[in-house]
Amino acid sequence: MNAMTDKIRQIARRLLEEGKVDMVVGFRKGTVPMMSEPCFIKDSARVDALVWDGNCGINLANYLTRRKERMAVVAKGCDTRNIVTHIIENQIRREQVYIIGVPCQGMIDKRKVKNLADGEVLSVEEKDGKVVVTAGGGEKSFDRTALLQDNCAICHHKNPALSDELAGELVRENPDVDRYEDVRKVEAMGAAEKWKFFDELLSTCIRCYACRNACPLCYCPTCFVDESKPQWVGKGQDPTDTRTFHFLRAFHCAGRCTDCGSCERACPMGIPVRQFTKKLEKDAKELFGWEAGMTLDARPPLDTFRPDDPGAFIK
């Protein structure tokens, strides 16, 4: 990852010194292991704070909307697809953002690391396809692929969909991986079994809205769960209100979600909330041939109408 970090710093320094951007949005090392955090660099003297590693899982597209500055942003494949969606939805102007594209080998799942470590994790180092974890019980080495976030393990678009400059060589895509095996298992269930499945999935939800807050698609000035005139959803942990929040939020992401995994990464309870959005992603692809954020030249299927649109699913 060092070569990628060096290249990102080099590009950021040049853009700031040449006055092409007012700010670079990237990552710096966090204060605890496995928590690289977003940062905003406005002075070229500070670009050495920028880093890139397998802990840069936060989707930086979340920090670009409604800003006035000329920005450069360090963006992996799913981030760039969200940037494309923001441009289409008029949340960002294309000429306002300089995309430093990062070919991505996937982000590390901190929960998987913690489950395998002996005691408190003190440091995590990536080298030559391995992840070396130092914890209270000593040092262990793991294959990096075994520690990837679930969304990264089945990613079809590791390379940036849109960029002005690349920070590294393009990586090999893996289009043959089955993205929807888990979705088909749920689709095959009967109604009662599905109800039980989702009840159990959401049983630990504390309605903290971390999934919503981390999602780059949730940029509404007032979320439907916060409306009071009228109040659509209760504020407590009533199961009906919890289900309403998760299902409606998923439908708001239909045809827009890039499966960046920010929602699951942010959930303090470890709920696999991608079970909702992946079903709708599968439907958008099968019904409309649509994958979110792959092009600026087409509108998403749910904000357009064609006479030949499939309609049997609404019967």
Image (tube, rainbow, N blue to C red):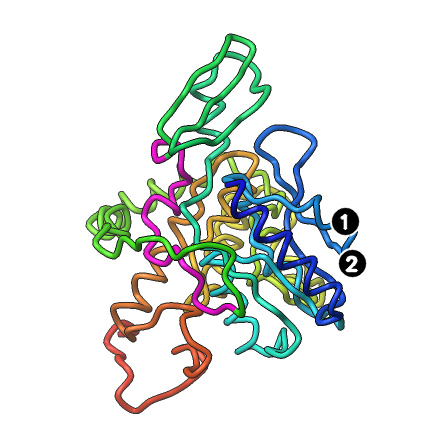
Q: Which residues are magenta?
A: 145-163
Q: Residue at x 58, y 57 (%)?
A: 74
Q: Which element type, helix, strand or loop, lies under badge 2? A: loop
Mark 2 neighbour class, 10 Å CA radius: few under 14, some 14 to 19, many 20 or more? some
- Where does the image place residue 130, in percent across and percent down from the top left? 40, 29
Q: What residue sits 40% from the left and 46% below the top?
A: 105
Indicate the amino acid at tag 1: Arg
Decide: few, some or many residues near mark 1? Use Cα within 10 Å; few <14, some 14-19, many ≥20.
few
What secondary structure is the magenta-colored segment mainly? Answer: loop
The amino acid beneath tag 2 is Lys
Asked if residue 152 is among those painted magenta in the image, a careful observer would answer yes
Q: Nearer the viewer, residue 125 or 263?
A: 125
- Residue 46 numbered tag: 1
Identify whether 285 is placed above or below 129: below
Q: Which residue sits at x=80%, y=56%?
A: 43
Q: Picture coordinates of residue 211 (x, y %)?
A: 56, 48
Location of residue 73 (image quadrant): bottom right
Q: Residue furthest top?
A: 137
Percent position (x, y) of residue 190? 22, 48
Contact flag, marks 2 and 1 (Cβ < 8 Å): yes
Quarter of the figure with residue 153 = top left
Judging by the rendered image, the residue that carries numbered circle 2 is 42
Left-right relation of 112 to 45? left
Residue lying at 51% horizontally and 28% vertically, measured from the top left: 125
- In the picture provided, is 155 more to the left or to the right than 266? left
Q: Position of residue 62 (x, y in %)?
A: 62, 59
**Total count of labels:** 2
